[in-house]
Image (cartoon, rainbow, N blue to C red):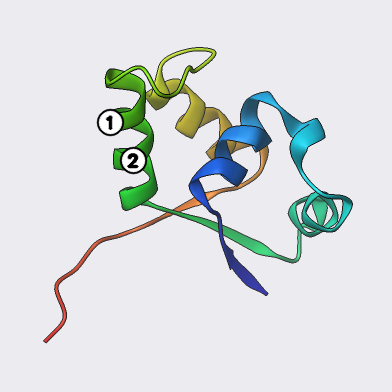
Amino acid sequence: MRYLLDTHVFKWLDSEPAKLSPKVSSLISDRSNQLVLSHVSIWEIQIKTQIGKMNLRTQLKTIVEDQQRINLVELLGLSVVG
């Protein structure tokens, strides 16, 4: 199954996994599932960090790269339709 990660789920996956529900944790740990993160979520995290509404453990680029490696998170491209 393919799952689009919500902004907060992605952040919690990285730095506060205890906040994830047991069901979400199970879906994430199941390697048959495909985890996808939108570039829009990355922008949202960057904006919230810059205006002081979100704190990160390290640089956003590092977090994204770590999650791509550790949890096989794929980035969802952005395109204009229509």
With respect to residue 59, does 3 lie above or below? below
With respect to residue 5, does 1 lie above or below? below
Q: Quadrant of residue 60?
A: top left
Which amino acid type is shown beneath numbered disc 1?
Answer: Ile
Q: Is residue 79 left or right of residue 67?
A: left
The crowd level at tag 1 (other Cα within 10 Å; few <14, some 14-19, many 20+) is few
Asked if labels 2 and 1 touch by Cβ distance under 8 angstroms, the answer is yes
x 56%, y 34%: residue: 11
Quarter holding the C terminus is bottom left
x 54%, y 40%: residue: 68
- Image coords of residue 9 (percent x, y): 61, 45
- Image coords of residue 64 (percent x, y): 47, 33
x 41%, y 16%: residue: 59
Which amino acid type is shown beneath numbered disc 2?
Answer: Glu
**Which label number is shown at residue 44?**
2
The crowd level at tag 2 (other Cα within 10 Å; few <14, some 14-19, many 20+) is some
Disc 1 from disc 2: Cα separation: 5 Å
Front residue of 67/56: it is 56
The residue to which callout 1 is attached is 47
Front residue of 6/64: it is 6
Q: How many marks?
A: 2
x 48%, y 12%: residue: 58
Q: Is residue 47 left or right of residue 57?
A: left
The residue at the far bottom in this view is 82
